[in-house]
Image: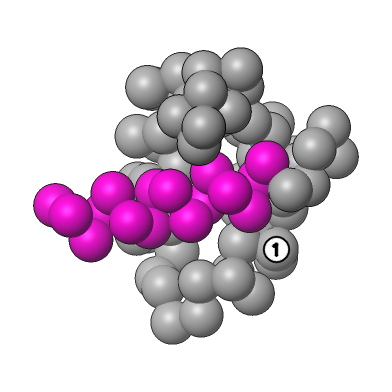
Amino acid sequence: MAMNESISETMLRLVAKRGNIGASRDDLFNEFKGIAYDELEQLINELEQGGFITVQWLGSYDFVVTITPEGLECLT
């Protein structure tokens, strides 16, 4: 599970850098080369359920992720 924690932290840092604009699906795939969509979706769901990010779905497979204050707190 340490690997997932590392990926989670990397995702939070990327999303935090994007600020209010958020990180798109393409941004995340560019950062996490080789990750399967199902794995990415699972990670996003876990972070969203934990209150660390919010997800705005723009279509069936298109979304934008933004960080919450709780997510920012995790990075400090």
Residue 29, position as x, y percentages in the image = 59, 69
Query: At 52% from the left edge and 52% from the top edge, which residue is drawn?
Result: 11
The residue where tag 1 is placed is: 27
Horizontal side of 70 relative to 40 (left or right) equals: right
Query: At 54% from the left edge and 44% from the top edge, which residue is drawn?
Result: 12
Residue at the farthest front position: 76
Residue at the farthest left position: 1
Q: Is residue 64 visible?
A: no
Picture quadrant of residue 28: bottom right
Picture quadrant of residue 31: bottom right
The amino acid sitting under disc 1 is Asp
Relative to the observer, which residue lies in front, 74 or 12? 74
- SS majority, magenta: helix
Horizontal side of 51 relative to 26 (left or right) equals: left
Relative to the observer, which residue lies in front, 36 or 11? 11
Query: At 45% from the left edge and 64% from the top edge, which residue is drawn?
Result: 37
How crowded pointer 1 is (Cα within 10 Å; few <14, some 14-19, many 20+) is rated as some
Horizontal side of 10 relative to 24 (left or right) equals: left
Q: Is residue 12 magenta?
A: yes
Residue 46, position as x, y percentages in the image = 34, 34
Residue stretch rendered in magenta on the structure: 1-16
Q: Is residue 20 visible?
A: yes
Q: Is residue 8 magenta?
A: yes
**Is residue 64 positioned above or below 11 on the image?**
above
Residue 53, position as x, y percentages in the image = 55, 29
Horizontal side of 45 relative to 21 (left or right) equals: left
Relative to the observer, which residue lies in front, 69 or 62? 69
Query: At 40% from the left edge and 48% from the top edge, which residue is drawn?
Result: 8
